[in-house]
Image (spheres, rainbow, N blue to C red):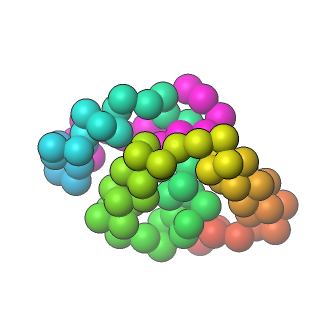
Amino acid sequence: MSLVGPRPLTAGELREFYAEDAAEVLSVKPGMAGLWQVSGRNRLTYEERRLLDLCFVRRRSIGLYQKILARAVREVWTGANTI
């Protein structure tokens, strides 16, 4: 597991929600913080989560990692995105 990356998914989630995109998402290490978590987490649908995971995989860069980490720290500090 890495610091930044898509959250780990169960086999059922991969089959049901990711289907043909599963291999692409699994091509990167899962992370503790990801684009999905800092973009709304449980307020988002699985379709939105899938799209954010794919966006992360396809556009990953040092800059994107830094933005995700900065947003994750802010959310932990302020309690944002909590239920």
Q: Is residue 40 above or below residue 58?
A: below
Q: Position of residue 68 (x, y in %)?
A: 66, 53
Determine the image quadrant of residue 19.
Answer: top left
Where the N terminus falls, by quadrant? Answer: top right
Q: Is residue 10 magenta?
A: yes
Q: Residue at x 22, y 53 (%)?
A: 17
**Is 12 inside the magenta-drawn segment?**
yes
What residue is drawn where x is 72% and y is 60%? 71
On screen, residue 25 above or below 36:
above
Q: Toward which corner of the image does residue 82 lie, by quadrant?
A: bottom right
- The quadrant of the rendering that contains the C terminus is bottom right
Instruction: Tell whether 20 sits left or right of 37.
Output: left
Instruction: Examine the rendering and report whether any part of residue 33 can be seen.
Output: no
Q: Which residues are magenta?
A: 1-13
Residue plotted at (70% across, 55% down): 67
Seen at 63% across and 69% down, the residue is 81
Extreme residue in the right direction: 77
Q: Position of residue 80 (x, y in %)?
A: 71, 70
